[in-house]
Amino acid sequence: MSHSVLALVANAGDGSITTFRIVDDRLRRLAVSEVAPGCSTFAVDRDRYLLYAAGKDPAAILSCALDPATGQLETIATRPVDANLTYLALTLRGDQLLGVSYDGGFGCCWPVAGGQVGEPGEPVHHRNLHAVVITRDSRQAYLVSLGEDLVARYAIGADHRLVAEATVAAPTGSGPRHLVLNAHETAAYLVTEFTGEVLYYRRDPDTGDLSLQDQTSVVDPQAGLRPGRFGADPLAERLIWGADLHLAPQQNHLWASERTASTLATVPLGLGGDLAPVTAITATENQPRGFAVTPDGRHLLAVGERSTTATLYLIQPDGSLRQTDQQPTGTKANWVRFI
């Protein structure tokens, strides 16, 4: 029998979050909670059963308390923000929340206490920010700028200020999007939107410096897709449209999604973190902007912006995916996290 895991899925079209329980390779829907219009990215404080979600129109951060028995969310506080947020990340201690805005072109750090989000530190600015990742010690953050083809490293300073340290380039026109660090924080992996690649950066654990080592395509070669570009319609022109990526807890595989062909690619990793060529391409939910891997590395849960179901996969020893269940969720589902 597998361990029971709570899965949370944000449905931007409905402004809701669906809570599932994963037991014995199956999904059981527990609750659907109304959160906010356009609800998308969210960060979870697993120790306190708190969730911080981005809402749109008006742009805000919603603090929600989760009942782990029923799966129901209750909004307990709202913090207005200057523009819609694209990505939220919480420090390990749960005392600071970082977020970035694609449309607003800024990143901020907010203090958090008891589910209340306080006044942010001074914002920093890059074009079309798409992700923010925090180191385990909460001292550094990496902000990914799709518009500038770079990753910017900041120190998290006093008064919740982000202090610029360095930037590292992604290939010109690649459209860097989401980034993950490996367990030892000696490697960073970045998925690109326009070229559909995973980039491997070696990370210096002392300084935080990133150096590009390798890259590999995660696009289905049978799909006939061409590189994307800023402002183009990828569906109308059949262009590459990379989205999300996640690592196996065992650090032996990663997976990346591509939205035009609606696929998940399996990328094996070497002992040193090196990339190997894709070994499996799995057709998945329509337009898979978001997915995630369970903390035990047993399952992957994928959703799609153009579907109304969530698909659960059992991860095979070789990193390929075997579907075990599919259940309804809301519309424009785009974010998945676990407790």
Image: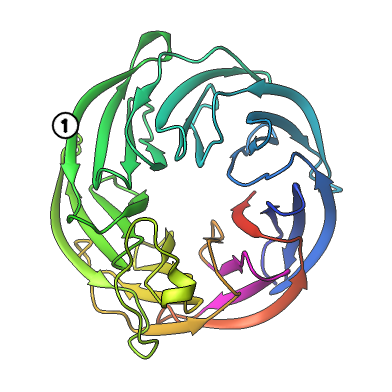
* Quarter of the picture holding the N terminus: bottom right
Residue 106, image x and y in percent? 41, 29
Q: Is residue 303 magenta?
A: yes
Dividing the picture into quarters, in which one does residue 78 lie?
top right
Residue 108 in the image: state x and y as whole percent: 44, 24
**From which residue to which does the magenta span run?**
298-315
Residue at label 1?
A: 207
Instruction: State the SS at label 1.
Output: loop
Q: Is residue 65 left or right of residue 286?
A: right
Residue 104 % position (x, y): 46, 32
Q: Nearer the viewer, residue 236 or 212?
A: 236
Above or below residue 141? Residue 81 is above
Check if residue 253 falls in the magenta segment: no
Asked whether residue 204 is in view, the answer is no
**Above or below — where is 162 with respect to 42?**
above
- Inspect this view and state whether residue 231 appears: yes
Q: Nearer the viewer, residue 212 or 100?
A: 100
Residue depicted at x 17% and y 42%: 168
**What predominant SS class does the magenta segment belong to?**
strand
Q: How many marks?
A: 1
Colouring scheme, one of rainbow, by chain, secondary structure, one colour? rainbow
Residue that appears at 47% across and 38% down:
103
Left/right placement of residue 250 relative to residue 307 reads left
What is the three-letter code of the residue carrying label 1?
A: Thr
Q: Horizontal placement of 232 versus 59: left or right?
A: left
